[in-house]
Amino acid sequence: MSYMNNQYDPKRHNLYKPMNPEKYTGDVNKIVSRSSYEWTFYRWLDSNQNVLKWASEPLAVPYIDYTGKQRKYYPDVIFQCLTPSGGTKTYMIEIKPFKETIPPVANKRKRTKTILYEQKTWETNCRKWAMAKKYCVMKGWEFKLITEKELGMGR
């Protein structure tokens, strides 16, 4: 796994300092956490004895956005872990709030601008995730969406 430079904005992001830096593939001084969900997942990866190695935004997956433009998607995490049978498995992870993993619902209280933004975001995410799944199939990996529900941070 290689490391791509994360865009770090100290006003909006935190840097995660691993307890087990030998497990992290990349620069341990540049692990950007963009949300409390990512921070919680990083902590789980870092402390889980079955996780062999992990990286934050380590590669780019090309996809075509809803306008037809070629773009790059950087999944949040890729990690490798031991399986119960003693083998290894690699996962590509996207961490999102649950509300962003389901189609948006229009209602009378939402402004048209909000509805259009949510629809574009949903379409973009669906395209990213479809390409990520194809990439994972080619590599023999598994793609997973992680939300606050899986992290035990349900609201």
Image (cartoon, helix red, strand yellow):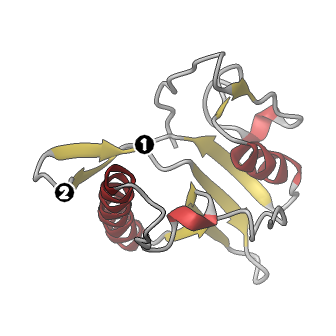
Label 2 is placed on what type of residue? Tyr
Circle 1 sits in a helix, a strand or a loop, which is it?
loop
Residue at 65% from the left image edge and 17% from the top image edge: 11
Q: Which of 125 and 116 is in front in this view?
A: 116
Residue 148 vertical position relative to residue 57 in the rendered view, above or below: below
Q: Which of 150 and 55 is in front in this view?
A: 150
Q: Which residue lies furthest to the top in this view?
A: 10
Tell me if 88 is positioned left or right of 91 in this view.
right
Residue 107 vertical position relative to residue 36 in the rendered view, above or below: below
Circle 2 sits in a helix, a strand or a loop, which is it?
loop
Which quarter of the rendered picture does the C terminus lie within?
bottom right
Q: Which of 104 and 47 is in front in this view?
A: 104
Picture coordinates of residue 10, whole percent (x, y): 65, 16
The residue indicated by pointer 2 is 66
Q: Which of 102 and 62 is in front in this view?
A: 102
Q: How crowded is mark 1: few (under 14 residues within 10 Å), some or many (20 or more)?
A: some
Q: Residue furthest front?
A: 108
Tell me if 120 is positioned left or right of 83 in this view.
left
Label 1 is placed on what type of residue? Leu
Residue 7 vertical position relative to residue 139 in the rendered view, above or below: above
Occupied quadrant, residue 8: top right
Residue at 38% from the left image edge and 74% from the top image edge: 137
